[in-house]
Image: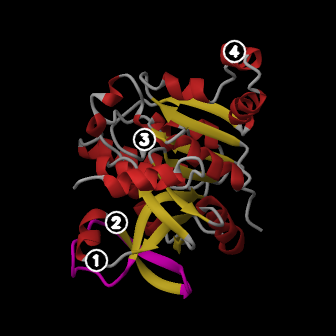
Amino acid sequence: MAQKVRKAVIAAAGFGTRFLPATKAMPKEMLPLVDKPIIQYAVEELVSAGIEDIAIVTGWHKRNIEDHFDYPFELEKRLEEAGKHDKIEEVRRIAEMANFHYIRQKGPYGNGVPIWNARSFIGDEPFLYLWADDFIDATPTRSQQLVAAYEQFGGSAILSSIRLSRDVDYKRYGYAIGKEVRPGLLKADKTIEKPGPGVIDSDYAIVSGFLFGPEMVPAISEALQRRAASGSANELYYVEGLNILLEQLKDVYALEIKGGKYYDCGDKLEYLKTVVEFGLRHDDLRDDLKEYLRGLSL
């Protein structure tokens, strides 16, 4: 029986240089999608899957994230004085969603570093690993689907995938290659980053969202040691630990996330598209926003 998944790590230490100067003083993960910051979608998704403890790996410039998931006593007092009790409940709910832990990122560059930084927090348990600036909006949620697959199949890694086969996709995403064990679940023999069109015969594109067994932590540590031995320890990527798991013949799966759509809010154009799309979901904004968009002279 698979070990219960209780923990998650969110990578949120990047500088957001593509959004400068907006991100000079505000983390890109706190950019709003109408009235909710991007990172809150990741947290709510994790909570939907039964996650109790969330470690957010941040940098010195990310204090706003900690404040967002804390109790804002002065704000609560002002809301109470204004009689806005529904707003009080909302801000309290944010702080009570999970047990939040904050880790300052140390070490080399790369998306494998947050796992290494969170190794004491992870311990010997499986964990979900998400980026803080993109997400898949799905029903059931991406994290629920990952946990369900882990409970059924186990494995050392389950990778969120969407099925993409355009030439441009092979230049943009990593891919898993292997054999389907059931529709929508591929047992991976290898992964390849941005292979380019016509190189591989797979449409399992790997996007953000991973469920790793505890063995991913020593795999990441070994990857860091290999880099140090080769004189290139200034960066570390999660796929390096993933490749070590594959070398060890561990079970690695790519899971097609069903019933959802991928939103990459780390890209400026995709972020703007997401804001518009989510604005159209708001009952109080939809009609006026549609009218405004129709009236634009493009």
Please provide the residue range marked out in magenta: 181-203
- Residues packed near mark 2 inside 10 Å, few (<14), some (14 to 19) or many (20 plus): some
**Helix or strand or loop: what does disc 4 sit on?**
helix
Residue 15 seen in render: yes
Residue type, numbered disc 4:
Arg
Q: Report the residue marked by disc 1.
A: 166
Q: CA distance from mark 4 to mark 3?
A: 40 Å
Q: Report the residue marked by disc 2.
A: 174
Residue type, numbered disc 2:
Gly
Q: Nearer the viewer, mark 2 or mark 1?
A: 1
**N-terminal of the two: label 2 or label 3?**
3
Colour scheme used in the picture? secondary structure
Q: CA distance from mark 4 to mark 1?
A: 52 Å
Residue 124 seen in render: no
Q: CA distance from mark 2 to mark 1?
A: 13 Å
Residue type, numbered disc 3:
Val
**30 vs 263: above or below:** above
**Helix or strand or loop: what does disc 1 sit on?**
loop
Q: Report the residue marked by disc 4.
A: 78
